[in-house]
Amino acid sequence: MTEARKITLQKLVTWSKGSTTMGPRTLSRPIGNIWMDSRKIERGDVFLALRGETVDGHRYVGQALQAGAIAAIVARKKLPTFPAALRRKLIAVNDPLKAVQRTAATWRRELAIPIIAVTGSNGKTTTRHMITTVLRSHLSTGETFANWNNHIGVPLSLLRFGGDEQCGVVELAANHEGEIKPLSRIARPDIAVITNIGYAHIGLFGSLTTTTRTKFEIVAGLKKRGGILLLNGDDSRLVRYARDNNLDAIYFGRSKRCAVRATDITVTAGGKPEFMVDGRRYALSVRGRHFIYSALPAIFAGKEYGMSEGRIAEALRRFRPAHMRGTIRKKKGTTFIVDCYNANPSSMKSGVTLLRDVAGEGSAVAVVGDMLELGSASHRLHRALGETLARAGVERVLAVGQFSTDVVEGARKTGMSTSAVYRTANAEEGVEIARTMLRSGDTVLLKGSRGVRLEKIFEAF
């Protein structure tokens, strides 16, 4: 990292349009990370005081400074509430959130590196991780921190870039229309990736039409000259929207329209996919053919930034999923597919396909939790999940949560026997049922929205 590229307190004050009484020597100091959680503060960091629905971060400014923060960004109107001794370490701004967003946008321009932005209903985190894994084998690559992908997390993630990166990969998420556009304008991507359109958060978006329109907000900040829009060409909604709005795009997927096209797809006995792209064979170490759709943008990015096909293939082979995102674990002779981080109709279908691939000729069992934030479509989509499980030949099903009755109804309606379908209100009760219904030799899919906490069943088994 070169000295000139570091963010100093002076730059932070200037870019945020803030005011402070700090002296020149203090203002010349480089900052560490910016946190909105005072418990995360380490010496040299900066505390961002945000006011939430239930907690006002201004109450924790003193705690953050005591923990080693060199400064705190606070609302100007709150300045008189602090003791004089603390005010010497404060940067006062009109709106702390807008100030940090403005600062991140300026820092992104100063970085002057290519950035890839990823959004979509499903698979955006895995796609982001896979692109980063490939690029890091060739270039110094910055990435979204943890799951910081919203109006607060994206700017804070960009401000964690050290200044010595050669490229970056950021994830953009939204729960409502209009939320991705400002994030894209902050990130100013050179490549914008949309993974797919699905029912995730449909209860908040209201319709798939609104979801589609929201995801395409990613083009708002896309580089005007030479920017690339990379779309899943097997998703008819993405293809139609791009066509209807005269958007130039490069497609990835399996269909003939795709420039980045996976062909000759096979799956090993353990569920690991292999496929061809432009005559080159790629083999993934993760289980689930749906991971191909995350690998294809990574292949494109690698080639775009000068990597050989062999180096890309090796990086993809080394990729591992994040915790609780489709990891395979074994206990007492039972194979568990632990995918408890999130769930929606599309990812559930992918999970069921993976279950069948991993189980092979053995017994396949599904423990499924609620798919949250589906709004008025919740009952219908949970019944459809039950139907999907029955048609896939799953031998036994345990449905957990508020909509478990709908899953059971769909499974029984589609031919599963009453004795093969179980339901319970929560994961704690599900532990006891799982202990009686699961057998040595079973392959078990554990998948549900994060709030259901299905990992408790695996941990207690």
Image (cartoon, helix red, strand yellow):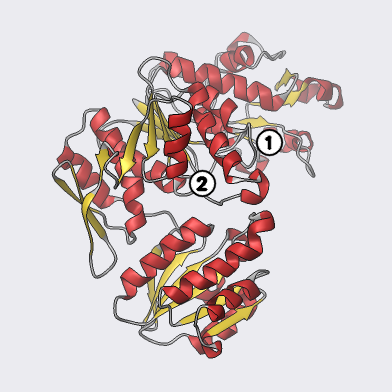
Count residues near mark 2 (Cα–Cα under 10 Å), then give few for <14, some for 14-19, many for 20+.
many
Where residue 73 appears, as percent x and y from the top left, is: 69, 25
| In-front residue for pair 445/412 | 412
Q: Is residue 67 visible?
A: yes
Where residue 214 appears, as percent x and y from the top left, is: 57, 35
Q: Is residue 39 left or right of residue 134?
A: right
| In-front residue for pair 61/204 | 204
Which residue does the numbered mark 2 point to in the structure image?
Answer: 121
Q: Residue at x 68, y 55 (%)?
A: 375
Q: Amino acid at mark 2?
A: Ser
- Position of residue 290 relative to residue 38, above or below, is below
Residue 364: assigned label: none
- Position of residue 392 relative to residue 103, above or below, is below
Q: Residue furthest left?
A: 279
Element on which disc 1 rests: helix
Marks 1/2: CA–CA distance: 36 Å
Please name which of the two marks, 1 or 2, marks the residue nearer to the observer: 2
Q: Residue at x 66, y 46 (%)?
A: 206
- Position of residue 394 relative to residue 83, above or below, is below
Contact? badges 1 and 2 (CB < 8 Å): no
Element on which disc 2 rests: loop
Report which quarter residue 267 is drawn in. bottom left
Residue 64: assigned label: 1
| In-front residue for pair 73/420 | 420
Q: Is residue 253 left or right of residue 195?
A: left
Position of the N terminus, as image quadrant, is top left
Where residue 340 appears, as percent x and y from the top left, is: 51, 63
Q: Is residue 7 visible?
A: no
Q: Amino acid at mark 1?
A: Ala
Q: Residue at x 35, y 53 (%)?
A: 291
Where residue 18 appears, as percent x and y from the top left, is: 69, 15
